[in-house]
Image (cartoon, rainbow, N blue to C red):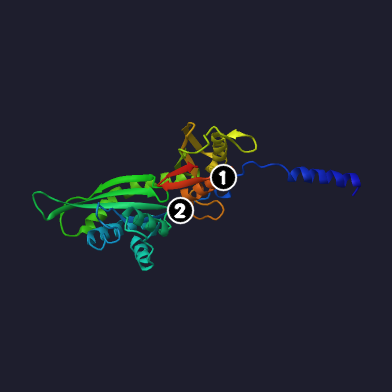
């Protein structure tokens, strides 16, 4: 190899190594243009009224246990992968995973440890005829939610015919049969959309009252306003670059529809809003900003100090 060729190759290598990369996409949210087929895992949980404990509600009512079982069987018969709520609840109790008696926290912990993509909340109501107490029907309310965000996927009300019977299980089965097909079709369509386009979250950013910055303050090598830095980062890291900004002012900024993947694109594990919030936290830290984060359902709250 001639000296001239060696110099030429070294110059190319040097230029290549020092190309600046301002914002590279987080691997976990980078689909690379590919979408993997994902079969949802579903867990059916009982509806609880105010004052009821989700940990004990099935123990006290055999009719609810029957209804939960029948709904799970309906999903199983259609090829869905289901998670047994009772088994997960027992495992949680045995391992003392519950950290409080707050019912919202308890439900969230059960759903999280289940690994389910979707949870279906089932409410059963036994209706007795006003003319004959032995004549009853069952009303069933099913509501499906995406597990990590709580976004609604499907809602249906099913009713069984009235019969003179004490066989609640049979009536529950009739109620399930009356809505199962429509309920599952809607749920599957919305879940497929999540797989293809990501799940929707909201990101609410604000500044501490005593912060010395505003969203117009300039940061980064290009000296861009903080709001522009955030929008560029969101465009890079939202799933398939899909996001929408509601608006911003000097002290606030809201992204009302940011898409994140259902699954981590590297590991294949479930991806949740907390993981996306962590990446945003690290980005802000890279700009020299300290921030706090709080997550409620599908909303991420970021407070910049």
- Foreground residue, 25 or 163? 25
**Farthest residue in the bottom direction?**
94
Say which mark, if any, is on residue 9. none
Give coordinates of residue 206: x percent, y percent: 46, 38
Q: Earlier in the sequence, mark 2 or mark 1?
A: 2
Residues packed near mark 2 inside 10 Å, few (<14), some (14 to 19) or many (20 plus) = some
Q: Indicate whether 57 appears above or below 222.
A: below
Q: For mark 1, what is the residue?
A: 283
Query: Tag 1's secondary structure?
Result: helix
Give coordinates of residue 267: x percent, y percent: 55, 56
Give coordinates of residue 25: x percent, y percent: 59, 45
Residue at 21% x, 58% y is 168
Quick check: marks 2 and 1 in contact, CB under 8 Å? no
Q: Indicate whether 71 appears above or below 295.
A: below
The answer to whether residue 272 shows anywhere in this view is no
| Circle count | 2
Q: Is residue 273 left or right of residue 158?
A: right
Q: Indicate whether 268 appears above or below 22.
A: below
Give coordinates of residue 65: x percent, y percent: 27, 60
- Quadrant of res 228: top right
Q: Is residue 243 left or right of residue 22?
A: left
Query: Tag 2's secondary structure?
Result: loop
Q: For mark 2, what is the residue?
A: 39
Give the CA distance from mark 2 to mark 1.
33 Å
- Foreground residue, 163 or 235? 235
Q: Indicate whether 84 appears above or below 287.
A: below
Q: Is residue 51 left or right of residue 194?
A: left
């Amino acid at each position: 190899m001639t000296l001239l060729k060696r110099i030429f190759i070294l110059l190319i290598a040097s230029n290549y190594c020092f190309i600046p990369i301002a914002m590279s996409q987080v691997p976990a949210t980078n689909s690379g243009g590919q979408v993997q087929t994902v079969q949802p895992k579903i867990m059916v949980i009982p509806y609880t009224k105010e004052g009821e404990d989700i940990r004990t509600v099935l123990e006290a009512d055999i009719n609810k246990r029957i209804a939960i079982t029948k709904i799970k069987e309906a999903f199983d018969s259609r090829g869905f992968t289901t998670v047994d709520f009772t088994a997960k609840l027992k495992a949680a109790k045995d391992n003392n995973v519950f950290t409080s008696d707050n019912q919202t926290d308890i439900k969230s912990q059960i759903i999280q440890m289940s690994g389910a993509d979707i949870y279906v909340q089932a409410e059963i109501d036994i209706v007795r005829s006003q003319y004959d107490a032995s004549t009853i029907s069952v009303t069933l309310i099913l509501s499906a939610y995406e597990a990590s965000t709580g976004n609604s996927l499907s809602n249906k009300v099913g009713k069984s015919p009235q019969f003179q019977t004490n066989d609640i299980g049979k009536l529950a089965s009739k109620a399930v049969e009356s809505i199962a097909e429509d309920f599952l079709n809607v749920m599957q369509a919305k879940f497929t959309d999540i797989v293809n386009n990501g799940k929707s979250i909201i990101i609410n950013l604000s500044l501490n009252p005593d912060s010395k910055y505003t969203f117009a303050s300039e940061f980064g090598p290009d000296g861009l306003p903080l709001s522009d830095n955030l929008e560029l980062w969101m465009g890079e890291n939202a799933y398939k670059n899909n996001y929408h900004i509601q608006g911003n002012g000097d002290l606030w900024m809201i992204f009302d529809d940011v898409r994140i993947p259902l699954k981590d694109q590297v590991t294949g594990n479930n991806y949740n809003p907390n993981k996306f919030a962590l990446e945003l936290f690290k980005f802000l830290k890279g700009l020299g900003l300290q921030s706090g984060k709080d997550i409620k359902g599908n909303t991420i709250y970021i407070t910049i100090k």
